[in-house]
Image: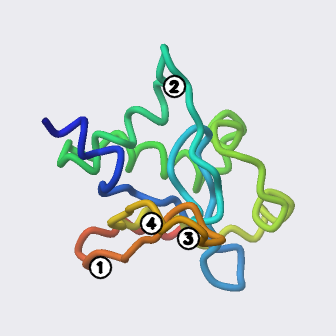
Amino acid sequence: AYFAGAVHQRKEMVLLADVGDGFVEVDVPYKVGRVDRMPLQTSPLHRRFAWQWWFIGLGQDPSWLVNFMELLCSKNDIAWQAVEYNNQVHSQLHKLRRVAAQMYQYHFSKPGSSAWWERVELSRRQRIELSCK
């Protein structure tokens, strides 16, 4: 069953924003992201926005994500409120150059590690990147 294996290893898209000094990760609430970020439990209900990201890792059409990234590029307040606040990005949205989403393969770290996750960046072909003008 896929759902049993998804707990230990899975593909996940990570959101990135560039405000002038290269890409910075922007976390999505209740979704796997930075490797030092503890996994969150939301049972019995799933957060719809995070749930949609999970299906991209399963091969779902990411066209909704491209639309969301276009809203981020246009500095849409509601779109930026849908992601976790990151002072490095949110305080400099006027400098926003690019947004991207990169696919990674995640699995839990070994016990005793300082990180919750280990991840490997998958092919750049599995990256979506938009220039913000």
Please rate how many residues cluster around mark 2, counting C-alpha atoms within 10 Å: few if below 14, some from 14 to 19, many from 20. few
Instruction: Tell me the CA gap for discs 2 and 3.
Output: 26 Å
Relative image position of residue 49 (x, y in whole percent): 48, 31
Task: Identify the residue position indicated by label 4 in the image.
Answer: 130
Specify the amino acid type for callout 2.
Arg
Q: Residue at x 52, y 44 (%)?
A: 31
Please rate how many residues cluster around mark 1, counting C-alpha atoms within 10 Å: few if below 14, some from 14 to 19, many from 20. few
Q: Residue at x 35, y 44 (%)?
A: 7
Task: Identify the residue position indicated by label 3 in the image.
Answer: 98
Which of these two is toward me, 65 or 117? 117
Relative image position of residue 67 (x, y in whole percent): 41, 44
Which of these two is toward me, 61 or 34? 34
Task: Identify the residue position indicated by label 1 in the image.
Answer: 124
Specify the amino acid type for callout 3.
Arg
Q: What secondary structure is found at the residue carrying circle 2?
A: loop
Q: Do the residues labelled 4 and 3 touch (CB within 8 Å)?
A: yes
